[in-house]
Amino acid sequence: MGFPKISFRVCESRHCPLFRYGDVFQISGIAICMASQDAHSFINTSMVHSPPDRGNCKILNGDLTKIIIEYERADQIPDCMISCSGCTGSIRLEHFRTTAREDEQAGTEGHIGSILRQLDDFGFFRHIDQGNLGNVIKYCKQRNCKKNEIILRKGDPGDHFYVIVSGQVDILNDTGIPIATLSRGEVFGEMSLICDENIGATVQTRSDCQLLTIDHKHFKALVDKYPALQTYFTRLLARRLADSNRVRGDDYASGMIGKLEEIPPEALFQTLNINSKTGILTITQLLKGTARFSFRQGALIKASYAGNKGETAFYEVLREKSGRFKFTPGLPPEDFDAPEIGYFMKLLMEGLQRADEERAAAAIK
C-alpha cells in the first residue's frame, strides 16, 4: 500500500510544550502491507517532518506513523486527538493532501501563523484584530540572524519593517557603540518607511535572532488599512524620544549649547521637559530668524518665532532642520506665575503630526 505525501496541521493545542496552533507536520514515504494466508504485516518506511525550529517529539511521531499504518487509504484518516503520554499536553490534528508546492507554502504559512498567534501581547499585533491576522501572514517573512549580524546600516534606503520574535538587537551610534537594545516584541525599521528617509541608525544583532519582516510596500498597506497602527507608531515615537532624551539629559544638567543638526527640535524640547528645566531657550540662525522659548519646571510657558506666539511658534520651529541653540537657566520674576501654553506631550504630538501631514502633501505634489 503506497501513501502520497500527507500533511497534518495542528487545529487545537492544549498546554503542549512544543507545538502551537497552525504548526504543520509532513509525512513522506510509504507503509507497505504484506499479506499472507493467516495475517497481514506492514513494512513502514515513512518519515515524519516536524515544523521548523520546533524540535521533535518521538511519541507524537510514533502516533502519526501508527495512523498511517492503520488506515488503508489516506482519505480514510479521520481527525484525531493525540495525547502525549510523556506530559499533560495534547494537540488535535487535521490532515490534508497537497502538492509539493502547496506543501512548501502551507509549511511556511503555518509556521508564521503559529508565530503570530504567540504575539498577541506584542504592541504591533495588538492593533490588528484576530479576524485579520490571517491577512497579515501573507505579508510576513521569517528571517533568522546570527549574533553580530548587521541588519540595517545607517544611510541605506529603508526597505523593511522588523518585529523581534526572539533574541536582541543593538542600536549603534556613529562610532559603533550601542546606545539602545531592543528585545522580544519590539520593532525597528519603521521610521525610515513612514518618513520615506534613509535609515537613521545602524542595527546589529546582540544574539542569534528570529525576526518577522514586512517589505516597504506591504508595510504601507497595513498602516493605511489599520488606522490604529498609526496611533501605535505615534506613541512609539514619543516613548523612544523620551528614552533617548533621558540619556541626553545627563549631559545637559546645566546650560546647553549645540546645533539642531545634532539634536532635532522635538528631542531638544523633550529633553527640557523630561528634566524639568527652568530657563530660556534661544535658537538662532533659523530660516525666519531667532526663536525664544521659556520653560518652568519643564512646562512651556512662552514661545515666539517669526512674529508668531504660543503654540503656533512652537509648531513652526519643529519644522526647522538647522540652527544653533543655547539654554540659559533661570527666569525673570514676572514669568514665575505665567500659565502653561498647553500640555507639553499633546503639543509635541500635534506638532509632529502636522509636520508629517505637510511632508505627505508635499510628496503628492
Image (cartoon, rainbow, N blue to C red):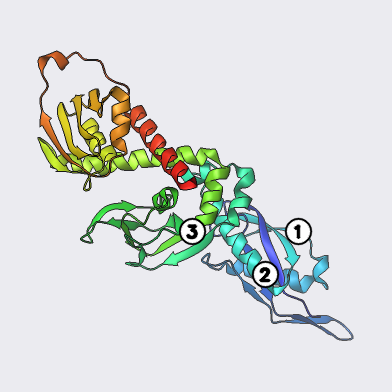
Q: Amino acid at mark 3?
A: Thr
Horizontal side of 235 relative to 68 (left or right) equals left
Please name the residue that numbered disc 1 is placed on: 79
Image position of 301 with respect to 100: above or below: above
Instruction: Report helix, strand or loop for mark 2.
Output: helix
Which of pointers 3 and 1 indicates the residue nearer the eye? 3
Q: Is residue 87 visible?
A: no
Front residue of 46 and 327: 327
- The residue positioned 24% from the left and 33% from the top of the image is 274
Image position of 265 with respect to 182: above or below: above
Q: Amino acid at mark 2?
A: Asp
- The residue positioned 34% from the left and 28% from the top of the image is 347
Front residue of 237 and 192: 192
Residues at marks 3 and 1, CA–CA distance in whole angstroms: 34 Å
Please name the residue that numbered disc 3 is placed on: 213
Residue 96, labelled with which disc?
none
Q: Amino acid at mark 1?
A: Asp
Mark 1 or mark 2, earlier in chain: 1
Instruction: Report helix, strand or loop for mark 1.
Output: loop
Mark 3 or mark 1, earlier in chain: 1
- The residue positioned 64% from the left and 66% from the top of the image is 105
Quarter occupied by residue 65? bottom right
Tell me if label 3 and label 1 are in contact, CB under 8 Å: no
Residue 103, labelled with which disc?
2
Residues at marks 1 and 2, CA–CA distance in whole angstroms: 19 Å
Residues at marks 2 and 3, CA–CA distance in whole angstroms: 22 Å
Circle 3 crowding by C-alpha within 10 Å: few under 14, some 14–19, many from 20: many
Image position of 266 with respect to 68: above or below: above
Mark 2 or mark 3, earlier in chain: 2
Tell me if label 1 and label 2 are in contact, CB under 8 Å: no
